[in-house]
Image: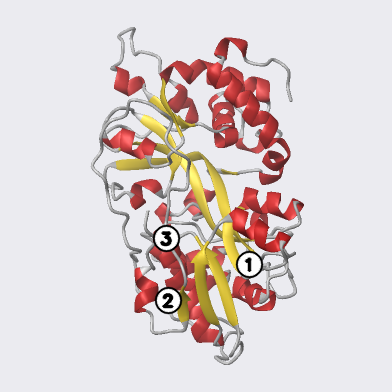
Amino acid sequence: MTCRPSRRSLLAALPLVVVAACGGEDDGPAQPTETPTVEPTVAPEPTSTQEPIGSPVASYEDPTRWGGRSLTFAGWGGEYQDAQEEALLSPFTLATGAGVQIKLADLDRLRLQVDNAEVSWDLLAIPAEDALTLSREGYLEAIDYSVVEKSAILPEVTLQYGVGAAFFSTVIAYQRADSAPSGWPAFWNVTPVDGDALPESVQARALKRSPVGTLEFALLADGVPLSDLYPIDLKRAFASLDKIRGNVLVWYEDSKQPVELLIAEQIAMASAWNVRPWQLGVSSDIGVQWNGGMLSADVWVIPKGAPNADVAMDFINFATRSVPAANFSRLVPYGPVNPDALLLLRPDRLPELPTSPTNLGRQFVQNWLWWADNIEDVTLRFEDWLLMPEETPEADR
């Protein structure tokens, strides 16, 4: 794959320099299965439901604030990064005078930079679980909450070594032509109606080949309340998975695959990221059910020894204010970590966002700490269950 500069950064008449930025598939290669051929779709450019929100950001009215200083941001490319540039990075440059450079993110390179005491990056946005791992390994700077005002940020993402950048959810995706499932119990319900066998595609499901989220959904299907998911009852979760494993057509690793299977009418329901139908341009055909969704988050982090950690810390504060956060969420359907941002968005945007008032309370927040403590053992148990179902380990770990 050839890396290409972001279109928006090439057009911007600001000191925002793209050194390398290209998007790649965020999941591993798809599990070898016989899957339908689906016409490739082009990821949309960030599109807004309203004009940019231009209200000034409090305390950011001095365009010489960081004059002569710069910020090196390592991003992941794609429309997500395009939206970061348009809504956050370029406005920060205008508001403070800080120059911004963008490079291609890679967590192994981050580790290598810190290990060699040759840190050149100042800022990344990474999954919260990765931030916990990196912080435990000593690769991140602690967040200075005397600079980052956390009172307006959802407390679930005000971490010691990271601050929320955006929320996304794993939800039930389904074909809009069908009735919306009410939740995970309906997802698990593959019993034929009145004794007549249902078409195979109606009974078919897709779930991610990962215990994270999949075990929580199994518990919800078995009647566990949202508030009682953690610590995960492994024995009960695997027993629930036993009930549906025969109907799971694909345990996917490529996060686009469940939506592609739905479009091809090979399955009736799947777990999927809420942003995937939008990214693949099929939101009119694929619906999402938020009930029982798992809220995950990307968080801003600063590598240990970053040369411009003070500028990065100030940027994090800027990016989590209501105006920049709202401008980001009007471009891409990720939920703002600052609830006040929702008040600035048009009402027709809110149903698409994970943290909107109508969606937030119907979901649970992924317990990153529990997973950081248990991911290795539980993943081994999950893989054993997949490969040797009749020999599923009985001992709780």
| Residue 53: mark in rendering | 2
Eyeballing the image, is 277 above or below 155? above
Tag 3's secondary structure?
loop
Q: Is residue 150 left or right of residue 357?
A: right
- SS at mark 2? loop
- Answer with left or right where residue 140 lies relative to residue 185: right
Q: Position of residue 322 (x, y in %)?
A: 54, 71
Is residue 86 shown left or right of residue 380? left
> Is residue 256 visible in this depiction of the protein?
yes
The amino acid on which the numbered mark 3 sits, given as a three-letter code, is Cys
Label located before the other in sequence (1 or 2): 2
The outermost residue toward the front is 116
Residue sitting nearer the eye, 111 or 245? 111
Q: Circle 1 sits in a helix, a strand or a loop, which is it?
A: loop
Image check: 328 left or right of 284?
Answer: right
Q: Residue at x 67, y 64 (%)?
A: 303
Q: Residue 252 appears at what percent x and percent y?
A: 44, 33
The structure residue drawn at horizontal position 36% and vertical position 72%, both measured from the top left corner, is: 8
Residue underneath mark 1? 152
Labels 2 and 3: the sequence-earlier one: 3
**Residue 395 x %, y %:** 73, 17
Q: Earlier in the sequence, mark 1 or mark 3?
A: 3
- Amino acid type at circle 2 is Ile
Confirm whether residue 323 shows in the render. no
Amino acid type shown at disc 1:
Ala
Residue drawn at 35 percent across, 39 percent down: 259
- The numbered mark at residue 22 is 3
Q: Is residue 115 above or below residue 391?
A: below
Q: Nearer the viewer, residue 230 or 265?
A: 265
Cα distance between the residues tagged 1 and 3: 32 Å
Dot 1, how many residues are within 10 Å of its Cα: few (below 14), some (14-19), or many (20+)?
some
Mark 1 or mark 3, whichever is nearer to me = 3
